[in-house]
Image (cartoon, grey):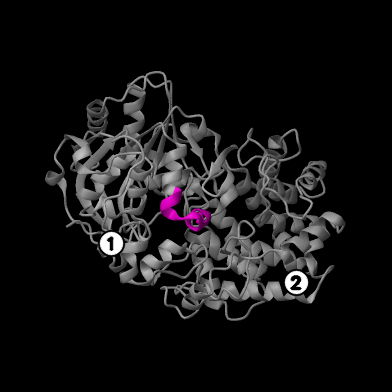
């Protein structure tokens, strides 16, 4: 991996074993998972995993930080991290069960009917569940994708009809929310009847959640264009991971990638470069 | 976005709008004694005007004293589209930074937690914040990823988390953009506080606030954060399908004041929107958070009529038009 990025990750690890979003700040789940994945095999990653395991609640869900007792989407990241470490013990199993058991918010029946028929200016089928940022909310592309990846990876060890059904529904939701330009906004293709345009980072993410799907050529072509032109290192990382997982060449960046002090982006950049397999939905996830 | 009941009804049928969008034809009732507030309107034709002087003029008109205070400037930084004007212009933010420093603040920081895009620093790059605000990275805090602390009771939640940078500021200056909003009617200095909610916990977009009720959440955020001042960038605002897909609308004014509800009510009148029909403004009024009646707002600087110009409204918001 990029030795500069990895060195920076090593020197910014907090004493508790986690990473903040920025150096010197409190530890959060998201940067900790990505940094631990990038430093796989090192003692720093072991310390991170030891910390993360203390953040899992009795119900199996993971809270995002030590002082925030609200389990949520980070559970998917921890399940993926457990698998990449080959740790299929209780934290992994309970995390999988939590993900399978979470539900989206259910609007009243009459609202669901109007959404289903597009009367609200956007189509939405609330009979299918994706993953929200927090349990009981509505789903969005990013948490949905991480739920898909985690459970698809988990299905190699701990499968069930319910798990398979959740992944199928979540992927259907991704397809349903694709924008007219063949990319993805943060979760909807329309609001109040107005078409939304694709974002770079969520387009990359959605393609990661749709590994193995057919009919993605136009989306992949858009992702290549975005990867070439983006100034966002975060978007560049997600698009690179997506293109690599789909077996595509990653085009050279033509834009000036903005500098960032953010640890998450640093770690994802390292993963994009050398370990996109962390997000692969298949046997390679544990290699 | 998935709407709550009020928002849903507001677009589901015009006949239902009046009853559920905060307007029932009657004057809203207020808790507590009447409030009178000063609001300054300062003309600025373009972003190349001397905005530091304009801001200092507005602050003086409103009698704000910030000596020794820790000030947080909170711009509206959402996402970037070069064809329109979504965000508080960098010139306004840079001028505010210079102006508040010159007024003797102990510390002036800039903080924002964009509601849509994950890469805050990339948006700051595209909007030229990092290029044109001296030492931007050193004074900026990404409020989506800051360290957090809980606040007890936020609407139906027992506790709600906010960035420490916002909780520890003595004064938060809402550097908002004058825009229409397809859910809230208008997004001005009060709605701008959605950016104080950390995405690291509540996600992108901050849809949990929609489920709690957009208007209710706006009012609640302004109940939690009371030491505030507003500077609304109306030099070029946004009309039509705001807050993202609307069209630029030149007004040529900055609107300022310590009472955010009064500032926003004044902005609404400039935009041709009736503030008594905007749910979060009537909500703020009813809770005694600010003045929204024209008679209770002491207008300083320029008159409303000298800068007023109707903003285009989308179909579902036409009922907001000021008579």
Quick one: SS at disc 2? Answer: helix
Please name the predominant secondary structure of the magenta segment in the image: helix
Measured as percent of width and height from the top left, residue B290 is found at 32, 39
In the picture of the structure, the residue carrying the numbered disc 2 is: A163
Q: Tell me where residue A196 sits by quadrant.
A: bottom left
Relative to B6, residue B280 above or below? above
Relative to B318, residue A32 above or below? above
Left or right position of A237 against B131: right
Q: Does the magenta portion include B207?
A: yes
Left or right position of A5 against B55: right
**Where does the magenta region start and end?**
B206-217
Q: Chain of mark 1?
A: B
Q: Which mark is residue A234?
A: none
- Viewer can see residue A251: no
Quarter of the image with the C terminus of chain B is bottom left
Relative to B206, residue B95 above or below? above
Measured as percent of width and height from the top left, residue A255 is found at 47, 54
Q: How many residues crowd mark 2 within 10 Å: few (<14), some (14–19), many (20+)?
A: many
C-alpha distance separating marks 1 and 2: 44 Å
For this rendering, which residue is in front, A162 or A257?
Answer: A162
Q: Tell me where residue B110 sits by quadrant.
A: top left
């Amino acid at each position: 991996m990029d030795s500069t990025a990895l060195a920076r990750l090593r020197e910014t690890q907090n004493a508790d074993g986690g990473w903040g979003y920025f150096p010197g700040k409190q530890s959060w789940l998201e940067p900790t998972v990505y940094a631990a994945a990038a430093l796989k095999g090192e003692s720093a990653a072991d310390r991170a995993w030891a910390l993360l395991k203390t953040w899992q609640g009795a119900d199996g869900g993971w809270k995002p930080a030590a002082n925030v007792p609200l389990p949520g989407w980070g559970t998917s990241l921890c399940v993926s991290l457990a698998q990449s470490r080959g740790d299929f013990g209780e934290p992994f199993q309970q995390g999988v069960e939590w993900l399978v058991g979470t539900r989206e918010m259910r609007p009243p029946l009459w609202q669901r009917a109007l959404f289903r028929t597009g009367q609200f200016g956007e189509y939405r089928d609330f009979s299918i569940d994706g993953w929200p940022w927090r349990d009981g909310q509505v789903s969005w592309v990013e948490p949905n994708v991480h739920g898909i990846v985690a459970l698809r990876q988990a299905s190699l060890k701990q499968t069930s009809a319910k798990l398979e059904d959740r992944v199928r529904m979540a992927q259907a939701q991704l397809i349903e929310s694709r924008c007219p330009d063949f990319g993805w906004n943060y979760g909807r293709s329309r609001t109040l009847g107005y078409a939304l345009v694709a974002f770079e980072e969520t387009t990359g993410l959605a393609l990661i959640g749709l590994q193995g799907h057919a009919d993605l050529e136009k989306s992949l072509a858009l992702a290549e264009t975005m990867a070439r032109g983006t100034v966002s290192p975060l978007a560049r990382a997600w698009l690179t991971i997506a293109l690599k997982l789909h077996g595509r060449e990653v085009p050279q960046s033509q834009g000036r990638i903005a500098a960032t002090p953010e640890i998450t982006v640093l770690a994802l950049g390292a993963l994009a470069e050398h370990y996109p397999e962390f997000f692969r939905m298949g046997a390679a996830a544990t290699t | 976005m998935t709407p709550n009941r009020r928002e849903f009804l507001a677009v589901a049928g015009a006949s239902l709008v009046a009853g559920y969008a905060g307007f029932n034809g009657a004057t809203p009732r207020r808790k507590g004694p009447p409030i009178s507030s000063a609001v300054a309107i300062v003309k600025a034709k373009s972003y190349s005007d001397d905005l530091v002087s304009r801001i200092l003029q507005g602050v003086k008109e409103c009698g704000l004293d910030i000596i020794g205070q820790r000030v947080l400037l909170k711009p509206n930084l959402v996402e970037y589209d070069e064809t329109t004007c979504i965000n508080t212009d960098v010139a306004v933010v840079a001028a505010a930074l210079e102006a508040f420093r010159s007024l003797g603040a102990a510390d002036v920081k800039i903080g924002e937690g964009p509601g849509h895009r994950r890469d805050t620093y990339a948006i700051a790059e595209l909007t030229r914040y990092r290029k044109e605000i001296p030492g931007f990275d050193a004074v900026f805090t990404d409020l989506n990823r800051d360290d957090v602390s809980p606040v007890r009771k936020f609407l139906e939640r027992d506790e709600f988390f906010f960035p420490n940078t916002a909780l520890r500021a003595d004064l938060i200056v809402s550097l908002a953009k004058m825009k229409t909003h397809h859910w809230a009617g208008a997004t001005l200095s009060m709605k701008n506080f959605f950016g104080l909610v950390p995405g690291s916990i509540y996600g992108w977009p901050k849809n949990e606030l929609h489920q709690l009720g957009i208007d209710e959440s706006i009012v609640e955020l302004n109940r939690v954060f009371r030491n505030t001042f507003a500077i609304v960038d109306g030099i070029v605002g946004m009309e039509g399908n705001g807050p993202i897909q609307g069209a630029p609308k030149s007004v040529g004014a900055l609107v300022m004041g310590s009472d955010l509800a009064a500032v926003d009510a004044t902005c609404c009148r400039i935009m041709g929107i009736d503030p008594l029909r905007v749910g979060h403004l009537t909500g703020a009024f009813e809770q005694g958070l600010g003045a929204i009646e024209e008679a209770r707002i002491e207008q300083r600087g320029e008159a409303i009529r000298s800068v007023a110009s109707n903003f285009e409204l989308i179909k579902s918001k036409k009922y907001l038009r000021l008579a």
